[in-house]
């Protein structure tokens, strides 16, 4: 950690490679998702140790609903179990949980668990952990645009700044990610945080998500620490 001269306030992770990890080992795809939960725990634990204020995970995209129904059902059950199992970890470590995305297609049991765990952790003072579940960047921008249109109908003379529009996104009052890490060697956003990632730094790791643990995470943070962030300006 000696090389971590500058840490991000908000780290976001696109967890990719669970299925490939499982198939390479002759296992079912869901086994990769199960093992991936351990990587989430490791990243969260390391983030707490370092004092990172916000950590977020792209857990399930709206496009993921197109996967085989059996895999989708297993993922929903896994998320439900993980929320229940990790509640004590959240409360013991002062972690506030937020779950953001389009809830319409989520099972009722999962919605109820989300509401319960988010409520019980709402005062967590040390770190905010965000799960993006059934999330799409395009959907997020569209739902914000609809809210803006409704406001303009009420007050046609009102003007909206970028900051005003940002407050209509699901991530209102959450800082944009300073660093986005994607695992498994893929190098794309995949419809994730399209507005919020405008000035994020990116680190693409070849490691499959179930193998992405403390050492790989620290390497990504060290890479971020070396970046010169100018935001379009000259230093």
Image: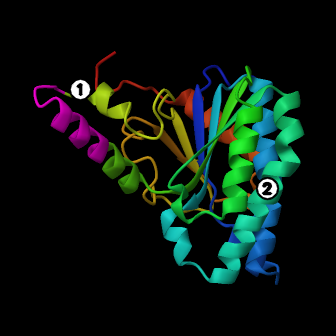
Q: Residue at x 42, y 57 (%)?
A: 191
Say which element carries label 1. loop
Magenta stretch: includes residue 133: no
38 vs 233: above or below: below
Measured Cα–Cα span from mark 1 to mark 2 = 39 Å
In the image, residue 60 lies at what x, y percent? 59, 60
Identify residue for label 2.
37
Identify residue for label 1.
161
| Residue 199 visible at all | yes
Furthest residue to the left? Answer: 157
Q: Which residues are magenta?
A: 145-159
In the image, residue 80 lies at what x, y percent? 77, 58
Q: Residue at x 73, y 20 (%)?
A: 125
Q: Are marks 1 and 2 in contact (CB under 8 Å)?
A: no
Q: Residue at x 51, y 35 (%)?
A: 177
- Quadrant of the rendered image containing residue 120: top right
Residue 153's disc is none
- Quadrant of the rendered image containing residue 91: top right
């Amino acid at each position: 950690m000696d090389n971590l001269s500058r840490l991000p306030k908000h780290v976001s992770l696109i967890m990719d490679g669970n299925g490939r990890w499982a198939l390479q080992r002759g296992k079912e795809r869901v086994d990769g998702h199960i093992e991936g939960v351990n990587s989430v725990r490791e990243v969260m634990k390391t983030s707490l140790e370092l004092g990172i204020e916000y950590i977020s995970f792209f857990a399930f995209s709206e496009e993921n609903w197109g996967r085989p129904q059996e895999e989708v059902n297993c993922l929903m059950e896994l998320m439900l179990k993980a929320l229940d199992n990790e509640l004590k970890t959240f409360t013991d470590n002062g972690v506030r949980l937020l779950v953001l995305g389009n809830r319409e297609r989520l099972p009722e049991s999962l919605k109820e668990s989300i509401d319960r765990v988010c409520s019980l952790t709402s005062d967590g003072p040390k770190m905010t952990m965000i799960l993006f579940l059934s999330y799409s960047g395009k959907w997020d921008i569209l739902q914000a645009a609809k809210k803006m249109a409704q406001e303009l109908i009420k007050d046609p003379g009102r003007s909206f700044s970028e900051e005003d529009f940002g407050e209509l996104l699901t991530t209102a009052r959450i800082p944009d990610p300073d660093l986005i890490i994607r695992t498994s060697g893929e190098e794309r956003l995949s419809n994730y945080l399209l507005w919020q990632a405008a000035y994020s730094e990116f680190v693409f790791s070849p490691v499959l998500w179930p193998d992405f643990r403390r050492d790989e995470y620290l390497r990504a943070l060290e890479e971020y620490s070396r970046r010169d962030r100018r935001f379009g300006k000259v230093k």
